Amino acid sequence: MKKFLAVLLSACVLAGSAIAFSACGDGRETLTVYTNAAFAPWEYLNEYGEVAGVDVDIAYELGDILGYKVEVRDVSFGSIFTNVQNDEMAIGAAGITITDERLESGIFSIEYATSTQYAIIPESMNTDANKTDGKLNMSALEGKKIGTQESTTGNILITDAINGTEDEETGEHVKGDLEGSGASVVAYKNGILAGENLGGQIDVLVIDELPAKSIGEGKTGYVVVELNAEPESYGIYMNKNATTLKKKIDAALQVMIDKGVIDYLILKHSGAIV
């Protein structure tokens, strides 16, 4: 990995560009990274109990490039946003989807990855009648107890489908795809805990693609299928006033994207390469 990541420019080289990065050497500023280590392969606890994952490696690479000392803190997903809102030298890196609602309280880096919502369902639900173009229709979840991870895109998507939404222009109620169907949503602290309750408290689990595949792997009697929903973009979440930090992180992320480093990290933490 170190050999591969050597293609990245050092912080000292980048400091000579149009963006003035922090100086190398001792006395480095600390970049606090808030994550939730239950969303593999983006973040998880490794065999030694350490926080690891794609986002964690990205954070440490950002620290190397920008000359920051990196401190990773494992917290609940929902509290990531509150913590970052209180600290201009903090970021949220946890497979966070860029949404208009989250942009009201903070700012995001450039998109560094994309994902779609997947469902872990019983094999009996995996039929052509429940799908369109190979993707699971929302209607297939009617009457089901649907597990999600709290504060995530999947939780918002399913909650809106069950409760309906409000038209932004008229204020009128817009019926959700699962409204009145008998479907219910159960939000768990993390996806791993939700997965443990499949076949018990919940019938199915809706979560992002890679965590779904990680949780669903080897789960007897279940399959992982893509949900017929809009794709989403991941970004690093920052304090609204951290505009200078955003410029630095955007530039460093672009280097990592251009050099294929993020693609490499996704493959590495997904177990496709060692």
Image: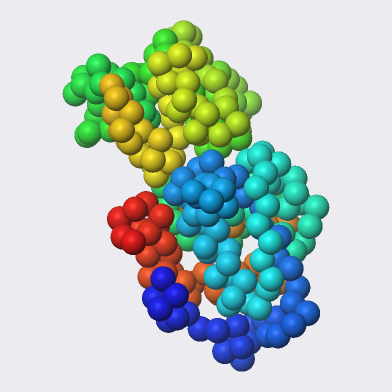
Which quadrant would the N terminus be assigned to in this image?
A: bottom left
| Residue plotted at (58% across, 63% down) | 59
Q: Is residue 107 something one can see in this rendering?
A: no
Identify which residue, 174 or 111, lies in the foreground: 111
- Locate residue 96, reporting x and y percent: 55, 48
- What residue appears at the point 22 percent right and 33 percent down from the top-left corner? 134
Q: Position of residue 11 (x, y in %)?
A: 60, 83
Image-based side of 80 in relation to 176, left or right: right
Q: Is residue 31 above or below residue 50?
A: below
Above or below, comparing residue 150 to residue 83 in the picture: above
Q: Residue at x 74, y 77 (%)?
A: 28
Residue 190 drawn at (x, y percent): 56, 34
Q: Position of residue 91 (x, y in %)?
A: 67, 58
Residue 86 seen by the camera = yes
The correct choice, above or below, for 105 with respect to 238 in the image is above
Identify the image's colour scheme: rainbow, by chain, secondary structure or one colour.
rainbow
Could you tell whether 40 is left or right of 96 in the image? left
